[in-house]
């Protein structure tokens, strides 16, 4: 799979330890909602991060990166993005993708594992807004559920969506 250069458009804190990274790829990335990209740090060092935006919005990439103090794995990626303002990626990878159909869907996530379920949720709301969806998202504290208010609003506007925060 070939590498794609991405411009770093922004890095913003979502919590004390989770950052939203907005990337613009030089070419559109062909991916399915729920997949991840590999960030190329070196030839033998590729680090996976789930794509948070829906597949229909493939001219940009949104990543949610958890970088606890002392977590050099994620911290080094964020630092490179801040310094170089660009990064090379490949993707989409992974099989945890949105499945076609009308059967009810249950999404379960904890922490930044929410990012791939968010991608699936947003794609599903676009292509099949009448599908019954229940999303469980867990965290240690309510403030760890960084899209909590957005999900409450989405559920209010989509009668087939049930959002259940788990703290």
Image (spheres, helix red, strand yellow):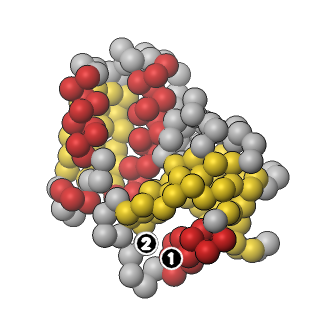
Label 1 vs 2, first from the N-terminus: 2
| Percent x, y of residue 89 | 70, 57
Which residue in the structure is indicated by mark 1? Answer: 75
Which residue in the structure is indicated by mark 2? Answer: 67
Lateral position of residue 42 relative to residue 93, left or right: right
Lateral position of residue 100 relative to residue 3, left or right: left
Q: Quadrant of residue 155?
A: top left
**Residue positioned 21% across, 63% down in the render:** 140
Q: Quick check: 163 above or below 65?
A: above
Tell me the crowding category of disc 2: few under 14, some 14 to 19, or many 20 or more residues within 10 angstroms, Cα based.
some
Give the CA distance from mark 1 to mark 2: 6 Å
Circles 1 and 2: CB atoms closer than 8 Å: yes
**Residue positioned 75% across, 74% down in the render:** 42
**Residue positioned 33% across, 27% down in the render:** 133
| Percent x, y of residue 13 | 37, 63
| Percent x, y of residue 149 | 23, 43
Question: Quick one: 109 or 6, which is closer to the camera?
Answer: 6
| Percent x, y of residue 108 | 34, 44
């Amino acid at each position: 799979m070939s590498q794609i250069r991405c411009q770093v458009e922004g890095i913003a804190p979502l919590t004390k330890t989770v950052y939203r990274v907005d990337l613009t790829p030089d070419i559109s990335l062909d991916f399915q909602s729920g997949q991840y990209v590999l960030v190329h740090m070196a030839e033998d060092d590729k680090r996976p991060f789930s794509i948070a935006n829906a597949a229909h919005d493939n001219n940009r990439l949104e990543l949610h990166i958890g970088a606890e103090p002392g977590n050099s794995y994620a911290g080094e990626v964020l630092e490179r993005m801040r310094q170089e303002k660009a990064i090379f990626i490949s993707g989409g990878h992974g099989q945890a993708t949105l499945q076609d159909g009308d059967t009810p869907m249950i999404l379960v996530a904890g922490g930044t594992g929410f990012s791939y379920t968010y991608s699936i949720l947003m794609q599903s709301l676009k292509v099949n807004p009448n599908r019954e969806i229940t999303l469980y998202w867990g965290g240690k504290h309510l403030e760890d559920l960084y899209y909590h208010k957005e999900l409450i609003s989405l559920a209010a506007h989509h009668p087939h969506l049930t959002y259940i925060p788990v703290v």
